Amino acid sequence: MVYRITLVGLGLVGSSFGLALKQTGAEFEIVGHDKDRSAAKRAHKNGAVDRTEWNLISACDGADLVVLTIPISGIQSTLAAIAQDLKEGCMVTDTASLKVPVLEWARELLPGTVHFVGGHPIIGALPDFSLPLSADLLAGATYCLTPGTDTPPQALRAVSDLVEAVGAKAFYLDAVEHDSLIAAVEHTPLLLALALQGMARKSPSRREMIQLCGQDYDHTMQPLVGDAQGLADLCRLNADNLVRWLDGFQAELSRVRELVANQDNESLRALFGEALEIRAGWVREHLGGPGTDYQDFSAARMMFGGAFEARKKEGE
């Protein structure tokens, strides 16, 4: 019997996910759904899915695994819509950058016969949504997995092997810890970009500023992509963590402002030297960190076929 995977959301991440799965050569059927019919048509034309279904329930009918690659603003309603129509033993995962609320929704809405594993791929460079789809979008990415307290081992193993299949590296952590850390490294930069954009917008020299914007400004603005409601929901749902990190940033910014105002060259040089050294260390650790141990995932590998083992051997 062919293993069926349903991708709900066929934008850049969802479609690239499908292309990566196709590249493994494993025998399974990939069904796609997107409320944007043009996105669904494009994903099918590019070979990311075997077929598409306009109706969400039909797309998930008979699925062994459902992957929600949609903004967090749509996850709760999507889980509610599909909950009673998923077959027994079906596994559901997502790609949202918050895990505590998503796990709560899954626990409240999904029946006990369906298993949920929270997921969040950390894409090294924020994707340009105008670029062509790529089977390598997730290659080498850290892929956070946050199972619930009642998630059975076989469900976690299956999703873990799925992560390995698309070329990513599984990183297991608690959902509360994930949301706190992601507030610092992903959502706080989002709000800094929002504030900087607001400052620039209000400047009487904004037209001249546009002409002077180079890669430094562009890189700072990169977090400002996606769905406005989804971005607002990320802030609302992770407010406590965000406020704590923003308070810390504000205190640090005040300290730096004081050094600049006083033209304290020695202190500024020391501060920059320390920051450059720390950043270099972070980059080295990020690029050369320990790999993921995939031992004891044999049951899930058998479920998906031998393509996972073949992919591992190719990389050795």
Image: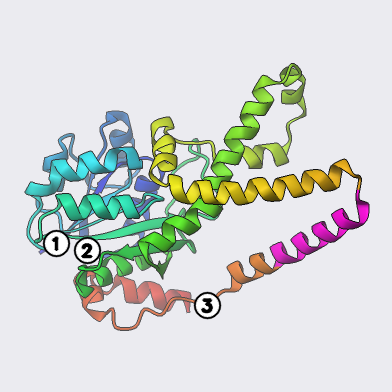
The amino acid on which the numbered mark 1 sits, given as a three-letter code, is Val
Residue 29 occupies which quadrant of the picture? bottom left
Disc on the earlier residue, 1 or 3? 1
Colour scheme shown: rainbow
Kind of element beneath mark 2: loop
Where is 161 relative to 227, above or below? below
Tell me the quarter of the image containing the N terminus.
bottom left
Disc on the earlier residue, 1 or 2? 1
Would you call the spot at circle 2 few (<14 residues within 10 Å), some (14-19), or many (20 or more)?
some
The amino acid on which the numbered mark 3 sits, given as a three-letter code, is Pro
- In the rendered view, does 214 fall on the left or right side of 155? right
Disc on the earlier residue, 3 or 2? 2
Could you tell me which residue is drawn at 7 percent across and 48 percent down? 84
Q: Is residue 270 magenta?
A: yes
Residue 220 occupies which quadrant of the picture? top right
Could you tell me which residue is drawn at 37 percent across and 66 percent down? 174
Q: In the rendering, at what x and y percent does residue 225 appear?
A: 50, 36
Q: Of 104 and 155, which appears nearest the observer?
A: 104
Q: Is residue 208 magenta?
A: no
Q: Please give the residue where the numbered disc 3 appears in the rendered image.
A: 290
Q: In the rendering, at what x and y percent does residue 19 appear?
A: 36, 52
Q: Are marks 1 and 2 in contact (CB under 8 Å)?
A: yes
Kind of element beneath mark 1: loop
Where is 149 relative to 253, above or below? below
Q: Which residues are magenta?
A: 264-280
Q: Please give the residue where the numbered disc 1 appears in the rendered image.
A: 2
Could you tell me which residue is drawn at 34 percent across and 42 percent down? 72
Q: In the rendering, at what x and y percent does residue 235 appear?
A: 44, 41
Inspect this view and state whether residue 90 appears.
Answer: yes
Could you tell me which residue is drawn at 18 percent across and 34 percent down? 54
For marks 1 and 3, give the one nearer the viewer. Answer: 3
Q: Please give the residue where the numbered disc 2 appears in the rendered image.
A: 27
